[in-house]
Image: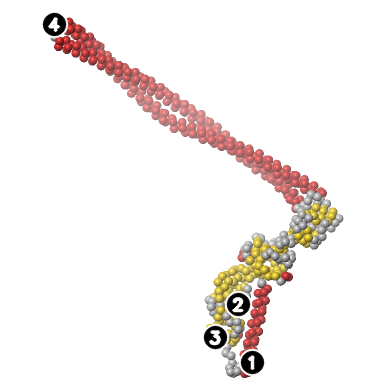
Amino acid sequence: MALYQSRRRILAAVLAGLLAVSLAACGRESKTDPGENPAGEEPVGVAVQASVVTAQSIATDNKVSGRVVPEEEATIMVGVAAKCIATYVEAGDTVRRGEVLCRLDLDSTLSSYNAAKIGYDSAVQSFNDQRELFDKQIAVARENVAVAEGQIASVQEQIDLAERQIPVTEQQIAVSEGNLPLIENQISMTQTQLDQLDPQVELTERQVALAQKNVTDTQALFAAGAASQKELDQARIAADQAKIQLDQLKSSRDQLEYTISQLKQSLESTQAQLDQSRFSVEQMRVQINQSRFQLTQLVLNRDNAELQVRQLESTRNSTLAQLEAGIENAKSGVQQLDGVLSDVDDQGNVIAPIGGLLASFNAIENSYISNAAPLAVINGMDRMKLTTSVSEALVPKLSAGDRADVYIASVDRSLTAEIRSIEKSANVQTRLYTVTLSLPEGMEDLMAGMFADVTFHTDRVDSAIVVPSEAVLTSGTAQYVYTVENGTAKYVPVTTGLTGSGVTEILSGLTGGELLITVGQSYVTDGAPVRLVGGTA
């Protein structure tokens, strides 16, 4: 496609030159050959071609060289000089994946590899065992820390509870101590009331006895007719009243005695409660002291457990670091031998890692192979890809998934490829970045090593004012074009932007819709008459 466009641009330039020469010649001939113009009139204006300026998309073309390479390629290296015992293929053969290419005498190397592999496996197993043991020990130590933390919290809670309870109990003690004198005073007052009531009871008992004797005497007098019924009734009433008063006094005395008994019990209970509260306070203080001592021990245990965790972790890290160093040493030996034997089985047979064309094969039976050059190179034949190198100025403008135009001259094939990957670091020698492109399927005629022209389209601008690049003229640092207005050429200075695919972006000077001279613009001046011929848009 790129070659085709290039050819079009060259052809257009040639045709434009021929047309201009032809037009000029025609002008000269018209003066000398009146037969060509029956009316005898000379054509007016320079013959030009023009097209309408439009907006379209444009992108910068960046052309680089690329190379077709196999999608899958395998280089077989054997890192030791070894004798080739037998060969089974030749360069140019098509081989299958897993096919034996040749056999090498690698007995000593294979023995070293097996020993290195055993050492590596042993180092890994030792590392895993030690790590598991340390992890268990650290888990137990951390659990001990957690248990100690729980015990500390529990004992501290007990101390806090006792410290909160002591003021409450001391307040109860103060209340009880204040109640004791009150109860004792009540007992004393009640006892005084009781002592004062006893003489009244005795006096009332005598009064009851006298009243009863008076009833008896009055009954005798009533029987003898010496006393009236009324006197007898009055005597009886007086006796009853005396008995009632006596019963009330005795009831009051019993009540006072009961009250004294209750007060004495309350006094004893208060005293007992006071003694118990005082004992409780002392017990709580003793408990607080014991708990504080226990707390100190628990904090010490916790600190020891945390120290044990740190020691175990430190020992674990240092021990595992040493074991890891041993693993890395063993791994290095294994990897080195892996590189040597990556495509060699335990019998010394060199195995094809992929199927494809055996591009090179450097093994000769009964001769030693070189450890500095590839033993074999296999090119996969199923798919091809394209690789190219771009500068640091271009690489930021490219992204995976972008498309590029590709032309492969050896098969005269134009196609579109897609960027698959872009390397993040430049080649140390060329300072260029490798870009890999995927080729479409069905490219059976492509072969590894073919060269290709790759065109990346960057800095794309949509709806830009675009004109053919040959329409833009230059004088010193100024750029300009000619348009057609009212049959005359108009000089229009312009500012250009991107250039690609034979067209140029116009940043200023044209807005679209103008009739732009595209052929013959080099033969006109500002204000000169022009006439449109052929190809007018």
Q: Which residue is mark 1?
A: 29
| Residue 100 percent location from the top left of the image | 80, 55
Quadrant housing residue 20: bottom right
> Which residue type carries mark 4?
Gly
The span from disc 2 to disc 4 (Cα, nearest Å) is 174 Å
Residue 63 visible in rendering: yes
> Which residue type carries mark 3?
Gly
Residue 64 appears left or right of 490: right
Label 1, secondary structure: give it.
helix
> Which residue type carries mark 2?
Pro
At 58% across and 90% down in the image, what residue appears?
Answer: 43
324 shown above or below 90: above
Q: Earlier in the sequence, mark 2 or mark 1?
A: 1
Pick out the residue farthest to the top.
224
Residue 284 appears left or right of 73: left
At 57% across and 86% down in the image, what residue appears?
Answer: 530
Do callouts 2 and 3 mark residues in contact (Cβ within 8 Å)? no
Q: Which residue is mark 2?
A: 468
Discs 4/1, front: 4
230 shown above or below 416: above
Front residue of this view, candidates 71 and 245: 71
Residue 527 appears left or right of 427: left
